[in-house]
Each structure stands twice: as C-alpha cells, then as structure tokens.
Image: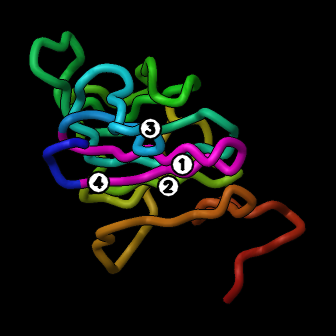
Amino acid sequence: MPDAHIHGLSVSSKTGQVLLATHDGLFDITKQPAAKIGATNDLMGFTGGTAHGVLYASGHPGSGSDLPNPLELIRSTDAGKTWERLSRQGESDFHALTATKSGIVGFDGTLSTSPDGKTWNTVAADFVPAALAGSPTGDCPGHYPARDPPLD
C-alpha cells in the first residue's frame, strides 16, 4: 500500500479493478498486497477516461524521471502501465481533473476544458474546486451539442 495520501481513484466497470493515484505513483488495490503500476510519479490530479483502460493525470515527475516538472496532462491507454504527454508540460499542474464525453475539465488555478487534451479553453468560474466530477455521458462546461443548449 502507498505511504502517501490518495489524490484520486478509478474503478473499472468491466473488471472491478480499483486504482489509487498517490504521491508515490499509481496502485492497484484489488491485488493483495497492493501492486504498484508504472513509473513513480506524483499524481496530483487523476481521473478515469470515458474508454476502458484510459486514465488522465497531472502532477510531478518522480525521482530520476526525465519528464518535465510539472507533468501537466498525461494519458495512459493501458490502465497506467505507460503514460504519454498530451499538453502543457512544464507549465502548470492540474490538482483537479475529470473526463466527460466531450473532453477533459481541469483546474490548475484556472478552470479549463479541452476537447482533446491538447488545446485548452478557459471557463469563467467564481469558485475554487477541490475536486471535479463529470459523467462519461455528459458534456464539459461550455461544450453543448446543438440539441442541448445551455440552461439559463
């Protein structure tokens, strides 16, 4: 089990696997003892994607890593074994993340949305989120299909 506190979790609806994102990396706690997955990175922001096995994270590289600090947005398509850089490396650090069918929502001091994890739009917000939640069937703020206009 990781020694640090937990920043996020993901539960697979297909396998029941429970992943914990911590300062010490990603852990599968459905295994006994808990099994570390992938490199040791400080995963400050973490969320499951809308497709099975897809994860998004942000944070800081682990000791000896050649990744930029902060990591900004990284994505795994193999349940955390490997990560690819998506955007804003070395610029900022999302401490809150969520994914919806229309994209990703992140907070790094500014609330932002992205349809692809690479281009970002700022969203006006008069609050500071400690956590973000989204539905895999819902839309990001400011991303509304033509058939569903925003509510007044």
Q: CA distance from mark 3 to mark 1?
A: 29 Å
Image point (59%, 36%), residue name? 116
Q: Of 80 and 96, which appears nearest the observer? A: 80
Secondary structure of the residue carrying numbered label 4: strand
Residue 74 lies left or right of residue 71; in this view the side is right
User: Marks 1 and 2: in contact by CB < 8 Å?
Assistant: yes
For the residues carrying marks 3 and 2, which lies nearer the camera in this image?
A: 3
Image point (83%, 71%), residue name? 148
Q: CA distance from mark 4 to mark 1?
A: 17 Å
Image point (53%, 30%), residue name? 79
Q: CA distance from mark 2 to mark 4?
A: 13 Å
Identify the residue position indicated by label 4 in the image.
Answer: 7
Amino acid type indicated by mark 3: Lys
Q: Residue 107 location in percent, x, y?
A: 34, 57
Residue at the limit of the structure toward the bottom, as seen here: 152
Identify the residue position indicated by label 2 in the image.
Answer: 98
Residue 130 lies left or right of residue 48; in this view the side is left
Q: Is residue 110 magenta?
A: no
Image point (24%, 58%), residue name? 109
Residue 58 lies left or right of residue 142; in this view the side is left
Magenta residue span: 6-23
Q: Could you tell me which quadrant the C terminus lies in? A: bottom right
Among the two numbered marks 4 and 3 on one chain, the one whose residue lies closer to the N terminus: 4
For the residues carrying marks 4 and 1, which lies nearer the camera in this image?
A: 4
The dot on residue 31 is 3
Residue at the limit of the structure toward the left, as seen here: 63
Is the residue marked by circle 3 packed among few (<14), some (14-19), or many (20+) residues within 10 Å? few
The dot on residue 104 is 1
